[in-house]
Image: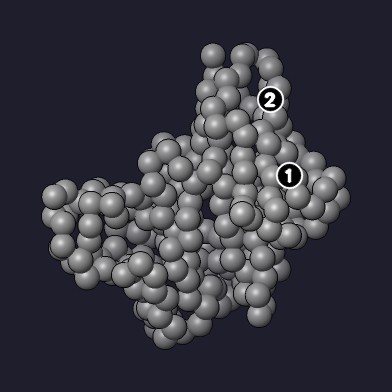
Amino acid sequence: GNSVTQMEGPVTLSEEAFLTINCTYTATGYPSLFWYVQYPGEGLQLLLKATKADDKGSNKGFEATYRKETTSFHLEKGSVQVSDSAVYFCAPRTSGGYNKLIFGAGTRLAVHP
Amino acid sequence: DGGITQSPKYLFRKEGQNVTLSCEQNLNHDAMYWYRQDPGQGLRLIYYSQIVNDFQKGDIAEGYSVSREKKESFPLTVTSAQKNPTAFYLCASSKVVSGQETQYFGPGTRLLVL
């Protein structure tokens, strides 16, 4: 079936550290891939997306590359800030028929000064 | 400004009571969705609507109902049949550009049972 696996949190980093949040998925068809971010008490915000193999999505210093051969879409940022503290969700969108976003539990990131 | 609004931000339900959560969008999106989020978990799809006057059950529709009489509005009713309604409810809408769909989310409504 369709599923997504993210590294368990919380991920705790010092400000300016390098961030990687791993994401692997199984999905039917050829999914589009999304990262969403949720700040405390808020809804989800689209962070970045990629729609085909080798595409790189980027936004606000975050990047992720669509790796079809490893079915992965790892999120990276070179230098995190305290304001990046949030929960991050990797979400593949299945293709064929109704296009459905698949959510895992998310990864909580805590950045301290 | 265009966006998705959800109201109220907090909602309290008494035992046996039906409550309705509002979701409005002025983005001219055709499709709208309702998700439920429990603490420490991801989102689960309750209902979705791809066009006015049509909607489909998602993965956890039992105890919920929806309507889609207008393009802009997709209210969710949590009925007394939903035995564990305490959760954070998120509404989303989507647009399709060049054959690719992207969902955008509202700020959410937190439902608590008294």
Q: Where does residue A100 sit, x and y in percent of width and height?
A: 61, 61
Q: Residue at x 46, y 43 (%)?
A: A42
Residue B59 in sight: no
Q: Residue at x 72, y 39 (%)?
A: B75
Classify residue A89 as left or right of residue B113. left
Neighbour tally class for label 2: few under 14, some 14-19, many 20 plus, Cα within 10 Å: some
Q: Residue at x 65, y 61 (%)?
A: B94
Specify the amino acid type for callout 2: Val
Chain letter of the residue beneath label 1 in the structure image = B
In this rendering, the count of numbered labels is 2
| Quarter-of-image position of residue B11 | top right
B39 vs B11, nearest the viewer? B11
Q: Where does residue A72 sit, x and y in percent of width and height?
A: 38, 73
Q: Where does residue A95 sit, x and y in percent of width and height?
A: 62, 72
Residue B97 in sight: yes
Classify residue A23 as left or right of residue B96. left
Specify the amino acid type for callout 1: Phe
Q: Are marks 2 and 1 on the same chain?
A: yes
In terms of sequence position, does the residue under pointer 2 or pointer 1 come before the other?
2
| Quarter-of-image position of residue B36 | top right
Neighbour tally class for label 1: few under 14, some 14-19, many 20 plus, Cα within 10 Å: many
The residue that label 1 is drawn on is: B74
Disc 2 on helix, strand or loop?
strand
The residue that label 2 is drawn on is: B19
Residue A95 vs B35, above or below: the answer is below
Residue B97 vs A12, above or below: the answer is below
Q: Where does residue A77 sit, x and y in percent of width and height?
A: 26, 68
Chain letter of the residue beneath label 2 in the structure image = B
